[in-house]
């Protein structure tokens, strides 16, 4: 009996390995949107209002005249700050409407964040517990989704939007959708 | 031509490593001394070939030879020389070559020093090192070859991530790898011990300094990365619990546990199986780190370009080395004879608690890092694990570790008398509570700040008391002098390292609890008040660097109406890669850091968004780490660690 005890590390490791293998084969890259959600209607997400900012309900969200972005962010998230300048550019220079979902954040910090760095979001919803955005398949923040005018998810971007992503990925997709 | 030569030598070193793995292993099996003896020669040759091949690639980088695909992708002729060189390991292929270079360097060192070891042991160790080299060299040759040419070379390279253009980061990977790969030595020694079926005190004496070396480099490597994040990312933070940071932190925690358990194994001839397990786990963590960073299984801001086929290969390596080692451990380690018994309250007991805590901490970080992956695989729903988890779980774990750390060096081996201990530490306890209370009262601190400061002072005073006790403070001067000279360096090393932890804790606590930040839009001439400083935004220029142009702001810093300094935060634009980075300006002294970041300019009204952070005692974080590293270096210079080699020889003969 005593000997079996020594196999515990090995067994734990084997479990770990199974997960790694599964991840490696099933999903080629976590940065890509799981196929289940691509081209599907935006799932129902119920958010709270952030006092003092525009808010829009789900029904209004899925009927738009223009494709738009959903950006999940938080004031405590470092990479969110990195992409913030680019979000500002997207909204101010390229006039892309961005729907910001504030994720697991303190209301005060969230407000300070957009007051200080500027507000790229035309509307803001709050997901304090982080449970609603799971419906979107949010894995880690920041994440950004491109939604077409009839409310279908067209693209998912994981991680900060860098200049390259903005110019070479997001803007071309948006342009395509508008045409 | 030089590039092709490098390529050829790398391929040659693959075959030599194969020989280094096979011949000594067969030699051990059939008991052929001549075959075992070949191990050191192969180790030397392999190192020399890899070194030349590394230099060949380095030459391509230095001369900006853009016909080499890797150089074209990652370098730029306008880059300063130091970043051309560091560009070599700023990417997947090159960094792997560095990994192998360090691996073969360590093997050659073992071969050189191992002349004093029993031949069977050193041949087995080198054979395992050879196997690791085979695995990694074939990985690089077959999936990520750095020597591939392009047929229509570009005139200019594509540059590399400008945010990586920083001195601290340039030298960060070599240190980190010296640490990661250093763990391969204790790993190989453990496997050899399992195969031979014997762990003696002298085996531990050999493994300890290697572990210590790996620990020192790992500490420096992690600290450099964190220092870079602080100065370069522009958010005033220095640790983000990012998967890649965690990937380097897990081996560090395991190595720290290993360092402490090997003390027990050496001094008391017990906990041997555990020590071996930790050595295996520590190296596995460093392989896991390699996997996480390169496979794309977990995403992170600073991972290399992900490639699933590479991921599969590293997973295969992980399976081979970790799986094989753990299986061998399960089969063989029950036969290892365990040493003497001890009471729960003793030095051994305290060290075991240290081990339990550090292993749990490593497991905690592992779970937090991999949790999104588990959930995804099990339920297809996605979650994210952020700093709140790590802070909530990691910090409470560390509290008892620090509490015990302050007095465990005063405990005697085998069995400690509690009443003796009580007399010694009660004064320290009261004193540290008193100091903390006064400080928290004066500066209006939070309960968390109280806890952090208390732990810091408790550990600091405990450590100072312990070393003072050993020296015999209060006795005659001659006694004190002779005692302090005779005290082994490893004792000073330990105290220094523990003192470093104390300073680190105080730095972390104070810099986060009393941090102030101001973030606002200002125009030229505006003033910002933070703490007792006044900042005046006095001017704004355009400047030019070697491969960037920048907006540079000048801030005058006033304290008590006297101008004390100027700060120049910049926003750099790198035309080659079309990226803008922020260069924070930091006014740093022993007591505080003033950190200014220049944000985006609002073209409508010419306002600039500016962030200013004031963090007291932030430098103590780095001081603490430096002390820990110094402690490690002091320890390693101890005669004892070198004596191990010679006495081993005597004993074997």
Image (cartoon, coloured by chain):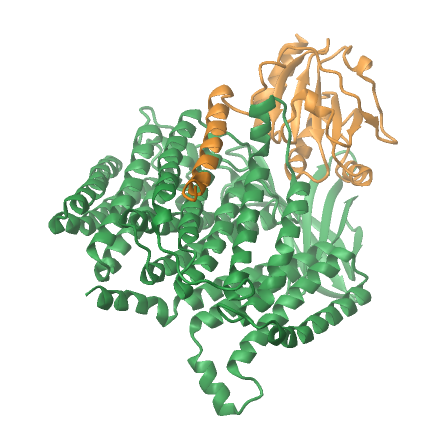
Chain colours: A orange, B green
Instruction: State the quadrant of the C terminus of chain B.
Output: bottom left
Q: Position of residue B126 (x, y in %)?
A: 25, 48
Q: Can you name the residue that lies furthest to the right here? A: A52
Quick one: B16 or B541, which is closer to the camera?
B16
Q: Position of residue B604 (x, y in %)?
A: 77, 33
Quick one: B361 or A43, which is closer to the camera?
B361
Q: Position of residue A68 (x, y in %)?
A: 71, 17
Classify residue B408 by image quadrant: bottom right
* Count of numbered badges drawn on the protein: 0
Residue at position x 54%, y 43% from top?
B363
Q: Is residue B223 left or right of residue B523?
A: left
Q: Is residue B391 left or right of residue B498?
A: right
Residue at position x 81%, y 67% from top?
B442
Residue at position x 57%, y 59% from top?
B622
Q: Up-down: is A153 above or below B262?
A: above
Quick one: B354 or B311, which is closer to the camera?
B354
Residue at position x 64%, y 48% from top?
B237
Residue A94 visible to the viewer: no
Instruction: State the quadrant of the N terminus of chain B.
Output: top left
Q: Position of residue B276 (x, y in %)?
A: 39, 50
């Amino acid at each position: 009996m005593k000997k079996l005890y020594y196999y515990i590390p090995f067994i734990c490791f084997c479990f770990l390995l199974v997960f790694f293998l599964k991840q490696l084969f099933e999903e080629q890259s976590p940065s890509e949107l799981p196929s289940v959600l691509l081209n599907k209607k935006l799932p129902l997400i119920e958010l709270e209002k952030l006092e003092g900012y525009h808010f829009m309900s789900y029904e209004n969200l899925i009927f738009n005249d223009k494709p738009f972005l959903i950006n999940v962010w938080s004031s405590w998230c470092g990479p969110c700050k990195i992409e913030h300048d680019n979000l500002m550019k997207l909204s101010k220079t390229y006039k892309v409407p961005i729907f910001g979902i504030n994720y697991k954040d303190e209301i005060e910090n969230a407000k300070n964040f957009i007051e200080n760095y500027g507000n790229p979001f035309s509307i803001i919803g709050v997901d304090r517990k982080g449970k609603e955005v799971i419906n979107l398949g949010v894995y880690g923040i920041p994440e950004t989704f491109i939604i077409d005018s009839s409310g279908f998810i067209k693209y998912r971007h994981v991680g900060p939007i860098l200049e390259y992503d903005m110019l070479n990925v997001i803007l071309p997709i948006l342009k395509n959708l508008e045409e | 031509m030089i590039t092709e030569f490098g390529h050829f030598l790398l391929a040659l070193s693959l075959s030599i490593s194969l020989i280094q793995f096979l011949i000594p292993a067969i030699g051990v099996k059939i008991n052929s001394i001549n075959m075992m003896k070949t191990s050191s020669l192969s180790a030397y040759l392999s190192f020399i070939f890899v070194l030349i091949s590394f230099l060949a690639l380095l030459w391509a980088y230095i001369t900006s030879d853009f016909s080499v695909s890797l150089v074209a992708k990652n370098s730029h002729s306008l880059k300063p020389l130091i970043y051309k060189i560091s560009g070599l390991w700023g990417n997947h292929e090159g960094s792997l070559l560095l990994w192998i270079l360090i691996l073969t360097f360590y093997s050659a060192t073992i071969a050189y020093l191992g002349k004093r070891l029993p031949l069977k042991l050193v041949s087995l160790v080198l054979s395992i090192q050879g196997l690791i080299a085979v695995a990694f060299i074939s990985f690089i040759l077959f999936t990520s070859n750095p020597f591939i040419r392009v047929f229509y070379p570009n005139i200019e390279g594509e540059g590399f991530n400008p945010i990586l253009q920083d001195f601290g980061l340039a030298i960060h990977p070599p240190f980190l790898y010296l640490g990661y790969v250093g763990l391969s030595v204790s790993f190989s020694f453990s496997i050899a011990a399992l195969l031979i079926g014997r762990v003696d005190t002298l085996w531990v004496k050999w493994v300890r300094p290697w572990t210590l070396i790996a620990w020192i480099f790992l500490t420096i490597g992690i600290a450099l990365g964190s220092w870079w994040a602080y100065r370069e990312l522009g958010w005033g933070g220095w640790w983000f619990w990012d998967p890649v940071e965690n990937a380097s932190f897990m081996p560090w925690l395991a190595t720290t546990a290993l360092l402490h358990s090997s003390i027990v194994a050496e001094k008391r001839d017990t906990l041997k199986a555990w020590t071996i397990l930790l050595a295996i786990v520590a190296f596995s963590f460093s392989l896991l780190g390699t996997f996480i960073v390169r496979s794309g299984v977990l995403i992170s801001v600073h991972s290399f370009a992900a490639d699933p086929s590479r991921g599969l290969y590293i997973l295969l390596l992980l399976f081979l080395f970790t799986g094989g080692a753990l299986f061998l451990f399960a089969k063989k380690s029950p036969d290892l004879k365990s040493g003497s018994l001890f009471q729960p309250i003793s030095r051994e007991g305290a060290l075991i608690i240290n081990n339990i805590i550090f292993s749990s901490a490593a497991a905690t970080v592992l779970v937090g890092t991999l949790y999104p992956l588990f959930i995804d695989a099990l339920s297809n729903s996605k979650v994210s694990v952020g700093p709140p988890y790590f802070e909530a779980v990691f910090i409470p774990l560390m509290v008892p570790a620090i509490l015990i750390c302050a007095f465990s060096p005063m405990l005697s081996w085998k069995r400690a008398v509690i009443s003796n201990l009580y007399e010694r530490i009660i004064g320290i306890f009261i004193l540290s509570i008193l100091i903390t209370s006064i400080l928290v009262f004066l500066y209006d601190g939070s309960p968390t700040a109280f806890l952090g400061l208390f732990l810091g002072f408790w550990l600091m005073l405990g450590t100072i008391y312990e070393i003072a006790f050993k020296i015999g403070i209060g006795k005659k001067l001659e006694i004190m002098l002779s005692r302090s000279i005779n005290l082994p360096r490893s004792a000073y090393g330990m105290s220094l390292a523990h003192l470093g932890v104390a300073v680190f804790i105080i730095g972390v606590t104070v810099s986060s609890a009393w941090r102030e930040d101001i973030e606002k839009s200002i125009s030229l001439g505006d003033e910002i008040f933070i703490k007792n400083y006044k900042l005046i935004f006095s001017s704004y220029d355009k400047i030019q660097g070697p491969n960037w142009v920048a907006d540079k702001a000048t801030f005058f810093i006033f304290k008590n109406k006297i101008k004390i300094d100027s700060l120049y935060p910049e926003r750099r634009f790198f035309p080659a890669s079309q990226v803008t980075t922020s260069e924070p300006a930091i006014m740093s002294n022993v007591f505080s850091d003033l950190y200014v970041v220049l944000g985006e300019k609002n073209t409508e009204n010419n306002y600039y968004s500016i962030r200013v952070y004031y963090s007291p005692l932030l430098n103590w974080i780095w001081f603490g780490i430096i002390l820990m590293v110094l402690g490690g270096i002091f320890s390693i210079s101890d005669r004892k660690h070198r004596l191990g080699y010679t006495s081993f020889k005597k004993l074997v003969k």
